[in-house]
Image (tube, grey):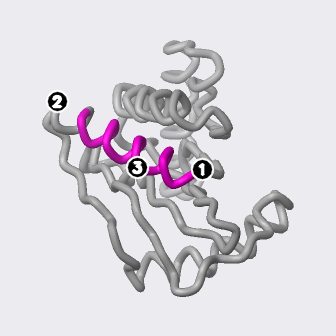
Amino acid sequence: MGVTIHYRAFASEEQVDKVIQSVKEICDDLKICYQLVSRVDSHWAHIFDIVLPTLSKIYPELRVELAEPRQMKGIIISLHPDSEPLSLVFHKLKDSRWLLCEFTKTQFAGSNVHKLTVAILDRVKEIIPSLIVEDEGLFYNSRDEELLRRILHVHDKMLKDLFRGR
């Protein structure tokens, strides 16, 4: 529970490499911690293996076959201790495309981290125009900061009420 940004895209290897380089430069400029992913991580691959079949029921375009042997590459960004990492990790498909299908929860880090996440996704969209972003904070499409703050506040109140047993 909490405000989450979902994002997905198919990309070429050239686009993947450009995203990694561009986001790395942003992180270096802003002194943001990140981790590069250049090989298969069994933990993340296992999670993706669980999530992808479920998502493919919602989004038929995600009914894809992963390449064998598995290949992953990308960048994972730590924007704030109270936010989930922004994962831009791509998975190689049998047809040579790369798939990005991720989400990040910004609820507990506040509106500035949410806006920074959107700004980074804007940069990704410049490189991969087919990127689809679904923002539960409604900021990605509206750019309405007050609306984002209100949505975060409502979610905070709901969570507090839930844990108080109301």
Q: Mark 3 or mark 2, which is nearer to you?
A: 3
Residue at 40% across, 49% down: 17
Residue at 58% across, 26% down: 140
Q: Position of residue 57 (x, y in %)?
A: 84, 67
Q: Position of residue 108 (x, y in %)?
A: 38, 43
Q: Which residue is mark 2?
A: 29
Q: Which residue is mark 3?
A: 17
Q: Which residue is mark 1?
A: 11
Q: Position of residue 96 (x, y in %)?
A: 63, 65
Could you classify mark 3 by the number of other residues whose Cα lies within 10 Å: few (under 14), some (14-19), or many (20 or more)? some
Residue at 56% across, 74% down: 48
Q: Amino acid at mark 2?
A: Asp
Q: Is residue 22 magenta?
A: yes
Q: Give the SS element for disc 2.
A: helix
Q: Amino acid at mark 1?
A: Ala
Q: Is residue 48 magenta?
A: no
Dominant SS of magenta comes to helix
Calculate the distance from the C-alpha at mark 3 to the C-alpha at mark 2.
Answer: 18 Å
> Relative to 140, does residue 18 appear above or below in the rendering?
below
* Range of residues picked out in magenta: 12-25
- Looking at the picture, tell me which residue is in the foreground, 10 or 34: 10
Calculate the distance from the C-alpha at mark 2 to the C-alpha at mark 1.
Answer: 25 Å
Q: Mark 2 or mark 1, which is nearer to you?
A: 1
Name the quadrant containing residue 155: top right
Calculate the distance from the C-alpha at mark 1 to the C-alpha at mark 3.
Answer: 10 Å
